[in-house]
Image (cartoon, rainbow, N blue to C red):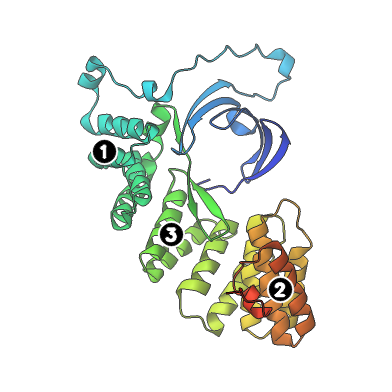
């Protein structure tokens, strides 16, 4: 998967259950270091630097479907500091191609938190698909969005080679970018991850049509991908001229979606917004109420956004008492949310 939205369920200190499209896995360990068991990758030890988006992995045992008692215990993995793993000696540099050397140096600077220096080094590695990918992602961090788009497009052209050098140096990049104000996606070095990043970069550069092209290409790859549908709805409602056709497209994108996770709930919220604009207020209010029935493990920001939209729908229906009740509940939870205080007639003293 080029991107994954994880739902993390806390089980005990240092232990959580990760649910994703690729399956279920159990993770043990503090922030920055963990052991992951399950899925198709077997048992992996992962050591990362919080905030860098880089993780170092090593498989310490791979499941074969046979009972656990028939497998020999995996040998302990010796810990090596991430920066040291990317330090090349004199003779190693002598036999390493210049672009690969620049890629490794860029990784090392990212681990150290030197994004500007990392970007300088990675610009010399953009002939490599992984180098172009990482240069694009670092450029996003530095606010160089036009440069990021150039690098990511280069990486997309050489998609067959994506991940080669990350695997060679046992590095797993996991870079998160916001899809909506409430939802972020993890970007991996795959064509799907690149297209999603390009869609977000294009949107921030004001190139809504180009962003839509990237998203449509993603939906062609996987028409049912919930993250792509969410990103496209957000783009349709916020970046393009909204009309009845746009609202109908949003409703169609959210067709057959159930309220299974935060991402699904966000997509259903956009569907409700579109129904509201189409004048289908009864359907919108019922949908928003259904979303609010599932509150456990849902971010407060998302729930407030759903309740705020329902209050607006109630106002359109002439149900002013119901609208005020929602606004009061929102104010009690977050008195500075949107224009709720103004709508309730509450003004600051002085």
- Report, in whole angstroms, how far the alpha carbon at label 1 lies from the one at label 3: 23 Å
**Crowding near pointer 3: few (<14 within 10 Å), some, many (20+)?**
many
In the rendered image, residue 163, in percent from the top left (x then y), is placed at 41, 37
For residue 125, which numbered disc appears in the image? 1
Label 3 secondary element: helix
Query: Which residue is more in the foreground, 103 or 67?
Result: 103
The reply to whether residue 71 is visible in this rendering is: yes
- Report, in whole angstroms, how far the alpha carbon at label 2 lies from the one at label 1: 53 Å
Q: Nearer the viewer, mark 2 or mark 1?
A: 2
Q: Is residue 191 above or below residue 289?
A: above
Q: For the point 23% across and 39% down, which residue is it?
A: 124
Q: Is residue 304 above or below residue 311?
A: above
Query: Which residue is more in the foreground, 228 or 331?
Result: 331
Q: For the point 53% across and 31% down, which residue is it?
A: 32
For residue 223, which numbered disc appears in the image? none
Q: Which residue lies under the disc numbered 2?
A: 327
**Dot 1 and dot 3 residues touching (CB under 8 Å):** no
Label 1 secondary element: helix
179 left or right, relative to 140: right
Q: Which residue lies under the disc numbered 3?
A: 200
**Dot 2 and dot 3 residues touching (CB under 8 Å):** no
- The earlier-in-sequence mark between 1 and 3 is 1
- Report, in whole angstroms, how far the alpha carbon at label 2 lies from the one at label 3: 32 Å
**Crowding near pointer 2: few (<14 within 10 Å), some, many (20+)?**
many
In the rendered image, residue 67, in percent from the top left (x then y), is placed at 74, 19
């Amino acid at each position: 998967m080029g991107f994954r939205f994880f739902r993390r369920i806390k089980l005990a200190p240092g232990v959580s259950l990760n649910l994703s499209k690729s399956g279920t896995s159990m993770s043990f360990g503090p922030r920055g270091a963990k052991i992951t068991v399950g899925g198709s990758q077997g048992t992996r030890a992962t050591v990362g630097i919080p905030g860098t988006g880089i993780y170092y992995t090593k498989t310490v045992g791979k499941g074969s479907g046979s009972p656990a008692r028939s497998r020999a215990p995996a040998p302990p993995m010796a810990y090596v500091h991430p920066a040291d793993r990317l330090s090349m000696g004199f003779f190693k540099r002598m036999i390493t191609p210049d672009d690969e050397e620049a890629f490794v140096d860029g990784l090392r600077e990212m681990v150290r938190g030197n994004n500007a220096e990392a970007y300088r080094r990675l610009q010399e590695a953009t002939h490599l698909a992984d180098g172009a990918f990482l240069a694009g992602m670092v450029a996003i961090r530095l606010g160089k969005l036009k440069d990021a788009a150039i690098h990511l497009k280069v990486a997309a052209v050489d998609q067959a080679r994506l991940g080669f050098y990350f695997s060679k140096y046992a590095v797993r990049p996991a870079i998160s970018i916001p899809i909506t104000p409430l939802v972020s996606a993890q970007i991996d070095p795959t064509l799907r991850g690149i297209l999603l990043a390009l869609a977000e970069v294009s949107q921030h550069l004001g190139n809504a049509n180009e962003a839509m092209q990237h998203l449509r290409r993603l939906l062609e790859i996987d028409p049912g991908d919930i993250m792509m549908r969410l990103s496209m709805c957000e783009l349709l409602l916020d970046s393009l001229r909204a009309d009845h056709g746009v609202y109908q497209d949003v409703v169609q994108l959210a067709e057959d979606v159930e309220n299974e996770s935060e991402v699904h709930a966000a997509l259903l919220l956009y569907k409700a917004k579109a129904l509201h604009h189409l004048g289908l207020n009864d359907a919108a209010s019922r949908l928003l109420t259904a979303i609010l029935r599932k509150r456990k493990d849902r971010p407060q920001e998302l729930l407030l956004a759903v309740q705020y939209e329902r209050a607006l729908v109630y106002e359109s229906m002439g149900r002013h008492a119901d609208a005020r009740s929602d606004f009061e509940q929102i104010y009690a939870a977050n008195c500075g949310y949107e224009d709720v205080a103004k709508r309730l007639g509450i003004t600051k003293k002085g």
